[in-house]
Amino acid sequence: MKKLLYILFFMTLLGVSAQGPEARKKIEAAKIALIAERLDLSPEQAEKFWPIYREFGTKRKEIRRDFDAARKNFDPNTASEDENKKMLEMATQVKEQQLKLDREYSSRILNVITTRQLNNLRKAENDFKEMLLRRIR
């Protein structure tokens, strides 16, 4: 069963181009499939876990999107010392917000799944990123 899921996962990635909302949907579906397989959630756990996980992902993207918007027109080579300092402070604040969010949602998720499953979730997310980066290269 594991091999079948991995084959489906890689077939999905092979069919995904690097751009567009359709590609993002396929990548997200592959990520969800990998997480579901790795966590082996009971039906009761799945019912409670996925809404929390999706909410966490949305908030994580919002934090990142705000920082990316601020960085979009920022050039450290032409920015003043104060502007560079502001950007560094903003980057630190984003990291702090991400850590705070991770702590909050880890706590909420632990009300639904076991610590082993939470560790497997983090490992699955990291493995997925690595697989995606390898595929892009």
Image: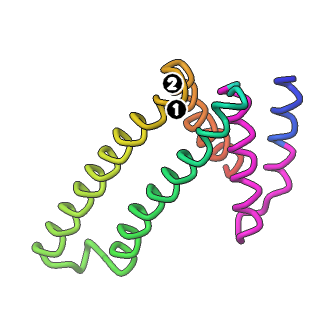
Secondary-structure class at tag 2: helix
Circle 2 crowding by C-alpha within 10 Å: few under 14, some 14–19, many from 20 = few
Label placed on residue 122: 1
Q: Is residue 15 magenta?
A: yes
The residue closer to the viewer here, 61 or 45, is 45
x then y, percent, for residue 14: 83, 50
Separation (CA) of disc 1 from disc 2: 5 Å
55 relative to 109, above or below: below
x then y, percent, for residue 38: 68, 27
Q: Is residue 85 magenta?
A: no
21 relative to 135, above or below: below
Residue bearing mark 2: 119
Please give the range of residues in magenta: 11-39
Farthest residue to the front: give it. 44
x then y, percent, for residue 115: 48, 20
Which residue: 30% across, 46% down?
100
Farthest residue to the top: give it. 116
For the residue marked with disc 1, what is the amino acid? Arg
85 relative to 99, above or below: below
Q: Is residue 116 left or right of residue 87?
A: right
The residue closer to the viewer here, 42 or 1, is 42
